[in-house]
Image (cartoon, grey):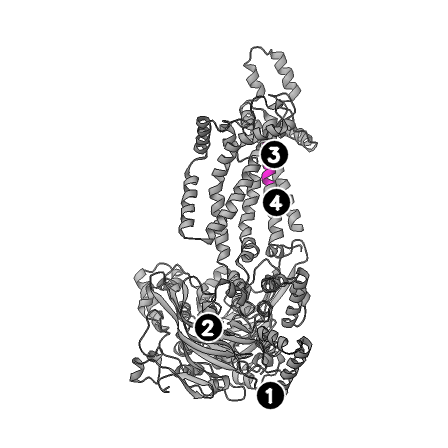
Amino acid sequence: MRFLLRRLGHAVSLLVGVSVLAFFFSTLAPGNYFDEMRLNPQISAERLSSLRAQYQVDRPMAVRYVRWAGAVLHGDLGFSFAYNTPVAPLLWTRARNTLLLTGTATLSVWMLALPLGVWSAERLGRPADVTLSWATAVLLIVPDLALALGLLVLAVRSGWLPPGGMVSVGFERFSTAHKLGDVASHMVLPVTALVASALPVLLRHVRAAVAEALEAPFLRAAEGHGISRRRLLYRYVLPAAAHPLIALFGFSIGTLLSGSLLVEVVMSWPGLGPFLLEAILARDLYVVIGGVLLSTLFLVAGNFVADLLLYWADPRIRAETPGR
Amino acid sequence: MVERRSRRSERVLTFRVWGGHVWLVRFGAVAQHELITGEKADLRQILEVRDLRVAYGRRDGGVLHALNGVSFGVAAGEILAVLGESGSGKSTLAAALLRLLPPSGQITGGEILLEGADVVRMDAVELRRMRGSGASIIFQEPLLALHPTIRIGEQVGEVLRAHQALSKRGRAKRAREILAKVFADDVERIFSSYPHELSGGQQQRALIAQAIACEPALVIADEPTASLDPSTQREILTLFLSLRDKLGIAFVFITHNPALLAGFADRVLVLYAGKVAEVGPTEAVLSSPQHPYTQALLKCVPQVETAQVVRRKTLLPVIAGAAPSLVSVSQGCVFEPRCEERMEICQVREPVAATTGSRHEVSCLKFPA
Amino acid sequence: MEPVIRVENLVKRYASRGLGRRVEAFTAVDSVSFSILPGSTLALVGESGSGKSSVALCLSCLERVTAGQIWFEGQDLAALEEKELRSARPKLQLVFQDPANSLNARWTVGEIVAEPLLVQGRISKRERDARAAQMLEQVGLGAEYLERRPRELSGGQRQRVAIARALLLEPRLLILDEVLSALDCSIQAQIANLLVELQRGYGLAYLFITHDWKMAAHLADEIAVMSRGKIVEQGPAEKIVRDARSPETQRLLGATPVKREPMEAVPEP
């Protein structure tokens, strides 16, 4: 229990630290939103200075940070200069879109990698396994960008799938079923791209973890007791192979928000990535910091979930940590 | 000796007599009678190994002949010790009996008759059914042979699950009963412990509990006491004896330590370079060994008796040379290069088992068959 | 005759870590005293957990003692700083039980045996090989073993290599921590003979740690029996073996033939 509390404490202090750094670096970047505006002749100088006063852009950084931190704890992530609306709902819509994409992709990747990994670990070194290894190696070498672009070209040429975006024109007028179908068809390409780039690495890890578990002496002993191969696999091998995979799983959760930037940009998927990119270029301070914080939250939560799972799954870790 | 009838014959008897109750009384009475009068029961062979040969394929293409024609038998309720050093093939023998050899190992000849059925010719289904309930095996390092993240009670339950149709609660209850046979006290704590929470001796007992869970006729123990303290070793040996006495289980006990044999094993089989050098009753083999290897091996142990004057720091007699590499099959007797009593004929002819006493056999050309 | 080493009231406690809680200490060695004369062997006999390996670690200065003194060549090793220990270390060598793990698997036998020379500064490879070959001969291995690796050797051969390495700097005391336990019995006899011959030839003192009382009685001049961190009985080997007083010793020496329980009635199935 104390172990978990300690991890939680780590997580929180990490979040705070990241928020400070994000704030610091963002304000350090030369220029701010209003500098851009100065170039616009339609905005008068007085208007500019009143806007600046309104946003308190000229106050010292520490003060601004404290005010911002206080606001965050109330759920207010600040105000977007560019969109002139509160940051939180903006981020949330975009984040939801991203999660839809990455959630599906992560689920698919794991559902593919686990059985394939087990299958190839059981046939380690044999032709089937070697072929699979070569195929994943090729997939690994191909750059994500090339993959995404290639898929896009395929879609455009064949016309089977919509080339980018999340919804078709006239979406609001569709029936619910049609809406679902529409989003789904838009999701196929980006999800495929994400899965193809994540699969090779995960597959290798699963294969290695299962192969190691298959070598273990307790397996031979259990076989000697007449336990069936299926039971051995599910009850003995997979739990033993799970530990390195749990850490990876935590990492998967961690990158749910941050791992899909490239694909979203290439495929015009209205997710968090392109939005943040845009905000950075426009010096939209509070959007940037809010986005960074949200991503970090996921990363930290992912790690924490992995710690939790590992603590629950492995009694030896429970035994080593004091405070039992 | 306690005679133990296999489950199959139990059912036959029940059928043929009048009903379970009457038969049970009969069985009990018969057993009691034999115990009281000390008569030896009809020594039915639980295990019969005939001319077993095992070879391993090496990565460089060569072949390692680990077992070259091993033959022996184990009677019901008997404890047979297999005495051998590294390279003798003893661990190979243990694995081969249940066909648990690694992928590079193959049984290249011979028969293994377990209660009449040939293990070598069993298909996958029969094999799985036999393992754990017809015969079971206890491996060397107890901590490694137990799954690290499954509780002991559940691990015993897994063996039950593989062979018996019990409910989950039934399994838990039965697992506790089995643990109670092996652990004197603290059964509940052991039941819900993980392997790393137990001492070496307790881990070994947990393995033994798994092995006897389905009351097999034969348990093969591959150096079960190697990593334990002397007093823990003695406890485990006592446990084996009591399991034999109470449950009628026969043991094949594999070891490299001759000191464990006296007062424990009924018979001893000495294994050298994949062949049986000598086999016979423990008393006979220890007090008057016939084979030159056995003689030399027993002399290697420092003879220190508590009552006598200790002759300290004298040089112990050793066996010259080293164990042969089993890659090439040699002509003649395999022990010949190291034998102090070798004759010319030993280089040419292979020895065959000859009887030199009551159930005492030696494979040496000094004793013509 | 002056003893080679004299241990007085040695105490070793291990602290188990507890975050912010009361730190519980575990006393592995509880005020142990003994001495060893040159050319003689003291056997430290006990079961696992009795503290005998901790004694070995303290004597070879791989662990700092909690209290007590170790008098060796006129100095108290327990009180010395790390730098000062360096001159004493070569004279006190430790050989471990498990030859598979105490030899560096990536090195050749020649490099392993000559490793102690690295401490002494730069010596040419040829000279290193010459010294190594010399030591290997002493332990019964020919010069062809110089280029072999540990995985090509048997257990007995590896143990010989470990002993050769220990002897390279001409120690006065060799601490042998269960060096025979992992070996087959005929190999145990060979290595035991080797140890006896080396002792005669070099006048070495041995601290022979084991749980095998037969081998201890065979090799030792004096036996000390340890149980739970204390020495419960100590004296000349014959006396201990013939006339053991304390219950722990009797249990250790206990009948090797396992006592058979009297036959009981078989319960109804």
Q: Is residue B103 above or below residue A71?
A: below
Q: Residues within 10 Å of mark 1 (few under 14, many from 20)?
A: few
For the residue pair B12 and A118, the one nearer the viewer reads as B12
Q: Which residue is mark 1?
A: B38
Q: Which residue is mark 3?
A: A294
Q: Say which chain tag 4 marks.
A: A
Q: Which residue is mark 2?
A: B112
Is the Cβ of the residue at disc 1 closer than 8 Å to that at disc 2? no
Q: Say which chain tag 3 marks.
A: A
Q: CA distance from mark 4 to mark 1?
A: 66 Å
- The amino acid sitting under disc 1 is Gly
Q: Say which chain tag 1 marks.
A: B
In the image, is A175 to the left or to the right of B61? right
Q: Which residue is mark 4?
A: A305
Q: Residue furthest right?
A: A74
- Magenta stretch, main secondary structure class: helix
Q: CA distance from mark 3 to mark 4?
A: 16 Å
Q: CA distance from mark 2 to mark 3?
A: 67 Å
